[in-house]
Image: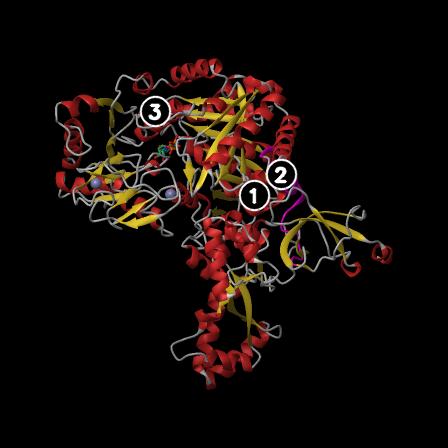
Amino acid sequence: MSTQERITLFADVIVPLAVPNLFTYRIPNDWNELARQGQRVVVQFGKSKFYVGIIARIHDKSPQDYEAKYIKDILDATPIVNETHLAFWDWVATYYMCTPGDVMNAALPSGLRFSSETRIIKNDSFSLEEAAEDYFTEREWTLVAALEARTELSMLEVADALGIKNVQPVIQSLISKGAARVMEEMKGEFKPKKESYVRFTSEINEEKLQEIFKELEKKAVIQLEVLLKYIQLSQWHTKKPISVKKSALVNSSGNSSLNSLVKKNILEVYEAEVSRLKQSEERMLQSNELSIGQQEGLEKINKLFIDKNVILLHGVTSSGKTELYMQLIDDAIQQNKKVLYMLPEIALTAQLVNRLKKRWGNKVGVYHSKFGDNERVEIWNGLIQKEPLANSHQPIAPEYSVIVGTRSALFLPFSNLGLIIIDEEHDGSFKQQDPAPRYNARDAAIYLAQLCSAKVILGSATPSVETYYNALSGKFGLVELATRFGGVEMPEIVVCDLKEDTRKKLMKSMFTPYLLGCMEQALHNGEQVILFQNRRGFANFIECKVCANVPQCTRCDVSLTYHKKADLLRCHYCGYSIVLPKICPACGSPLIETKGFGTEKIEEDLALFFPKARTARLDLDSTRAKNAHANIINLFEERKVDVLVGTQMVTKGLDFDNVSVVGILNADSGLYFPDFRSVEKTYQLIAQVSGRAGRKSKRGKVVVQAYNSHHPVITRVMGNDFIGMYNDQMEERKNFAYPPFTRLIEITLSHRHQEDLDAMAPALADALKNRFGNDRVLGPEYPIVSKVQNFYQKKILLKIERDKYSLKMKDMVVDSINVFLKKGKDYTKTRIKIDVDPQ
Ligand code: ADP
Ligand code: ZN
Ligand code: ZN
């Protein structure tokens, strides 16, 4: 259209920086028809920095205050983010009080942002001498130093230099501070995997083929063999031949026969893209028949979905919730809709994916952060709606109907989303802590579903107080499954008093005699045991017997945890580690003892009590490798492991049918944290771990060891009394004005110098008190860990009544912060972190 070409068009582009606004760029006239919303573009920012950004909108209004630069390049032919998702990004940025760039960084797999081939170079126009010491974080300084020495680094080298995997945030931050930039060459980050295929040339038809047969029979039997094999593999006679890989036709004598056939213009070789993702056989098992209770539940869900968008499925552990989800997935697939199935943790995906693949084969995709970049990009691209390809020989890009994923899967570019399942909806891992956006994937999913006209099902045996409140008040539908599938009994819960057994000197390591007895019995019967301990590592800390010195992290206000296998003292907040000192660093005495029990120590002690038992450990340390978690779970499932020791990871959603005893070694350790959710979390934890016991034929037993065995929450768990716990909590939350009666915004200030922080934090708190009133602002206070990575921190908590909460209030918060930052030059050295709905 020639009229189009004359119009000057502009694009508002989201850049991967922590800036509040979008930037407007000019679209070169030639590209007017190429440029579309949702495409990636390369844009210049400042004098010498180039970024990959996304076009958020296209319009014809030139910016008022600056002259728009030209877009340098358009990277995609088809948009990689659709309009609905861009609207969703916008909501996430507004609701969670972060920048559009933060959201883009969380949403796009890094393969679409940088490639591993991308090289970071030092920005020559930046003067290091002029940078204040605290202009960079510790990590950033490390990277700056590495760039000084080498001028140019690949992503891998950056990861090496920093000793961490996730390097994007550090790089991004260094770029935004002007000290580094990305070398050009941003194109083609994603390299499709190619494979050679074989097909008949267009000259071949039935008649011709007969002639060729006759000829080859006489002169070239081996070529004939290859040809026949092709005909067989391609199912040529069905008239709908399927693609045949070249490698399948190459016989022991090599390529030569195939090459001759190609030379004779009978066959031709072509290249096509193949998937990196493992393709399993399509099996398509029939669905299980639902029990009467499940059937009723399903009918109720479908009825409620007529006028509710969100339903809470509250079903006790092993009640068959997953089976119900599978029915709902079936229904969605029937209607050609896609399903997003979210789980709080990667560790859970393996078992579920196996279960789903048995029914839907390759229609099931997986998406989480332990997947390689290319695999993630492939899933992403597989979901983008593309124009159908003309070439029928193009291999089938996997068409996913169900994606199982952790929270980041929420941003996948679904185009026809019908249902979002959020299993274990109460789980804190749905909330991203750092970096921004600090979003809760459960809550954000509800908004996304609304944008897509999709339905949401929240499932849990122990719903969060907020969700249960929403269900009781009618905002969500509520469906309950009160009994376990197949009439399996709820496990027997026995509480052991740690205080008493310690006093009587009956404890063996972290085990009461009762728990050891139960384990003995189970192992004797060939049954399995799960042990839960809240701490990883070997000992919580080490202490000098002479001077009581406890080695602390040099950057954080916490003691270091002892990891025996690595022989290191490690900080669980910043990763700092030192070799275990042979003598006390304070007094020089060699009498150092370990205190407290981590999972590593529990596993080691097991060998003393049960030398024949095969043990395994499931925690952050044992699952760092890509498939480690799945491997451990498989071993346990195949009964090659008798006792599984783990942290939170063993509490969630796993389904084993031979576990008869579950031991919770220190059940009330979480209760004494100053957290208004601590009772709720403790209830969820004990109930969830208990749920792993006795799932099929036999009633299981749960041994709950606790120092305060009479705590009300333990009584509630023993009585399987969720409602009782909920009512206790609601009363307390009402009295102290906590969610669901209020909404919280937590503001964390941090600074290198304690005195400065102590002086500044009250100033911001006062400003907020002036605006919102004294009752709504708590703090500033030091959190339990008051220093992390050399930064002291203080928190201010804003509580706003549910019915008063609005976007305007968030604007007021931002405004107060901006006013505060303008107060003095030093104030800009304060880092401010905003967390909406902190977990
Ligand atoms: P939940 O998700 O509530 O923990 P699951 O769906 O995992 O429960 O079900 C618990 C166990 O019962 C699983 O082993 C599952 O295979 C089995 N189960 C549930 N419903 C059925 C059904 N309708 N037919 C056969 N087995 C079922
Ligand atoms: Zn000492
Ligand atoms: Zn530390």
Query: Residue 359 falls in which quadrant of the image?
Result: top left
Q: CA distance from mark 3 to mark 2?
A: 37 Å
Q: Secondary structure at mark 2?
A: helix
Q: Secondary structure at mark 1?
A: helix
Badge 3 density bin: few <14, some 14–19, many ≥20, Cα 10 Å: some
Mark 3 or mark 1, which is nearer the start of the sequence? 1
Vertical placement of 575 versus 6: above or below? above
Q: Give the number of the disc on residue 411.
A: 1
Q: Nearest to the eye among marks 3 and 2: give it.
A: 3
Quarter of the figure that contains the N terminus: bottom right
In contact (CB < 8 Å): disc 3 and disc 2: no
Q: Nearest to the eye among marks 1 and 3: give it.
A: 3
Q: Which residue is mark 2?
A: 88
Q: Position of residue 747 (x, y in %)?
A: 53, 31
Q: Position of residue 675 (x, y in %)?
A: 41, 25
Q: In the rendered structure, does residue 660 fall within the stretch colored magenta?
A: no
Q: CA distance from mark 1 to mark 2?
A: 9 Å
Q: In the rendered structure, which amino acid carries the disc numbered 3?
A: Leu
Q: Which residues are magenta?
A: 75-96
Q: Give the number of the disc on residue 521.
A: none
Badge 2 density bin: few <14, some 14–19, many ≥20, Cα 10 Å: many
Q: Position of residue 771 (x, y in %)?
A: 63, 22
In contact (CB < 8 Å): disc 1 and disc 2: yes
Badge 1 density bin: few <14, some 14–19, many ≥20, Cα 10 Å: many
Mark 2 or mark 1, which is nearer the start of the sequence? 2
The mark tally for this picture is 3
Q: In the rendered structure, which amino acid carries the disc numbered 1?
A: Phe
Q: Which residue is mark 3?
A: 671
